[in-house]
Image (cartoon, helix red, strand yellow):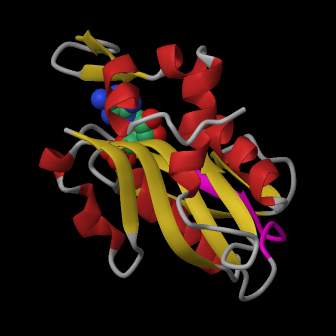
Amino acid sequence: MASNDVTLEELEAAIRNVPDFPQEGIQFKDITPVLGNARLLDGSISHLLGEHTADTVNVVAGIDARGFIFGAAMARELGVGFVPIRKKGKLPWQTHEESYDLEYGSNTIAIHTDAVTNGHRVLLVDDLLATGGTAAAAANLVAKAGGRVVESVFFIELGFLDGRAKMGDVPVRALVKY
Ligand code: AMP
């Protein structure tokens, strides 16, 4: 299927904004209309991959849970493996953990200690970059496991929250920015 004719404007137009979900004041960016459309899904994977090939990336790591949807498809397209970064308590084997602050309380995410081979180049993906807490913690987990994040890619970036600032040296790319 020819997908590269899908424009970023089309992807942006398909995002559904849901006010006050899951709580008042949050503008939830619903990507299910993108996922449910074969052409837009295919175009999303192409845009998220950008110029990457199996020569620049050894493995794709996706963040729980919507990062899994894009990440597994991207890994298959590149012909590399996929690593899930999950919420604490979900991975069955030995893990590295990383905690980060939320507006109220904190969150902990984890990676299997053997998920990444030493020195491997990791492409990190999630659906949305907001404050950057989740993605920064995920990049730290990759480093703890011995890998190096070559780029972090997001379908959506909420630029006004400046999540990029938390990513340090890790390059950040997003398809649709608010
Ligand atoms: P953060 O750690 O603040 O960058 O939050 C990023 C994570 O929270 C991602 O995994 C997103 O799926 C989710 N998220 C945060 N804000 C939104 C939003 N407005 N719409 C949809 N998902 C969001």
Q: Is residue 14 above or below residue 12?
A: above
Q: Is residue 30 above or below residue 46?
A: above
> Does 160 sit left or right of 128 as displayed?
left
Give the magenta-colored segment's residue range: 109-116
Q: In front: 93, or 150?
A: 150
Q: Is residue 23 magenta?
A: no
Q: Quarter of the image for the C terminus: give it.
A: top left
Q: Position of residue 97 (x, y in %)?
A: 61, 62
Q: Quadrant of ligand 1?
A: top left
Residue at x-position 45% and y-position 46%:
107
Q: Is residue 111 magenta?
A: yes
Using the rendered view, name the quadrant where residue 83 is placed.
bottom right
Q: Position of residue 43 (x, y in %)?
A: 56, 36
Q: Position of residue 66 (x, y in %)?
A: 57, 34
Using the rendered view, name the quadrant where residue 65 is placed.
top right
Q: Is residue 67 visible?
A: no
Q: In front: 108, or 69?
A: 69
Q: Position of residue 77 (x, y in %)?
A: 77, 51
